[in-house]
Amino acid sequence: MKLFISLLICFLSTICSAEDLLVPLSKFDNDSQKLSNDRVLEFWGYNTSDGGNNFQNAFTLRYYNPLEAGDWRGRIRLDTSVVSSYNLDTSRSNSQQYSSGNTMVTVWGQDKDFLNPLGALVGARVIFPFGNNGQWSVGPQLSWTFTPQVDSLLHVTDFSPLLRYMYSFDSKNNSFTVNPGQPPLSRYLQIFPTVGFELTPKTMLRFWDENGMAYNAAGGGWFVPLDAMVTHRLTNNLVVALGASKQLLQTYPQYNWTAYGKVSFNF
């Protein structure tokens, strides 16, 4: 009996400690409709490894802009990049080859009537074929932003999940008949369970913000990384960030690890 009472006290203490550390789900507000009107220009750099001697460097230019059409309010994001792939065994004797990376457009927002019960931002992404193995990719997405009503010991700032399903297809002049060496068409679900924590008034730690999980709907398999990024606001208009992502589960091959950073300008 004494042992049972001791275990019960320990269990209740653990629950109380957890409530102090985190914010109960009932204490979050859905702030998905609060969209920023800022224009944002970002410069990203990535270094990615497949776990062997193969690496890829990428430089990405990313731009956010507000959008408005009737009762619809939203945002548009434009991405374009240049990549350089190299192998440690041959990089000493060969110059790096540069090529275009993914170029894509993402739009999201909310109308006062369309899918309003979801309380989500509804959007879509289009990936152009320039750095996408000659394939187009399109897909819908849903995203939310939940902010806590109360503070906690871990200073949770938000929980911002995003779901996106991408569907690839070929143009007529880039079919498997014309280009039999291209990879299979991809179908995948992206999951971003993004959560943020305040380290200082100007510094934040964010998990699964830049790199999320993926499920290969075409052939099966999961890719699950641990992704973390620290952001620091230098001024009202200037933010810098450093992050890294390491695969934990990879039955759907993506990468072994990647390190990245950004400089962001708001105006």
Image: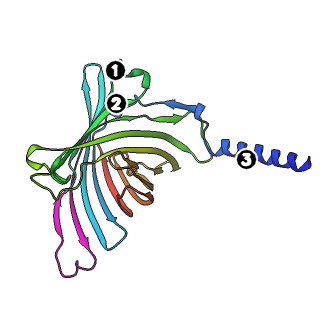
Name the residue carrying label 1. Answer: 114
Q: Mark 2 and mark 1: span between their CA atoms?
A: 9 Å
Describe residue 178's horizontal placement relative to residue 38 as left or right: left
Given residues 47 and 222, the one toward you in this image is 222
Amino acid marked by disc 1: Phe
The span shown in magenta is 77-100
Q: Indicate the position of residue 224 as horizontal and vertical percent values.
A: 44, 53
Are circles 2 and 3 on residues that touch, CB within 8 Å?
Answer: no
Name of the residue lying farthest toward the front: 177
Q: Which residue is mark 3?
A: 14
C-alpha gap between disc 1 and disc 3: 43 Å
Q: Residue at x 29, y 68 (%)?
A: 55
Q: Earlier in the sequence, mark 2 or mark 3?
A: 3
Judge the density around disc 3: few (<14), some (14-19), many (≥20) Cα neighbours within 10 Å.
Answer: few
- Residue type indicated by callout 3: Thr
The residue sitting at 25% across, 30% down in the picture is 67
Q: Is residue 104 toward the left or the right of residue 174 in the image? A: right
Query: Which residue corresponds to mark 2?
Result: 122
The mark nearer the N terminus, 1 or 3, is 3
Q: Residue furthest bottom?
A: 93
- Spatial CA span between label 2 and label 3: 38 Å
Quarter occupied by residue 133:
bottom left
Quadrant of the image occupied by residue 40: top left
Q: Judge the density around disc 2: few (<14), some (14-19), many (≥20) Cα neighbours within 10 Å.
A: many
Residue 125, image x, y percentages: 27, 39
> Circle 3 sits in a helix, a strand or a loop, which is it?
helix
Q: Quadrant of residue 8?
A: top right
Is disc 1 placed on a helix, strand or loop?
loop
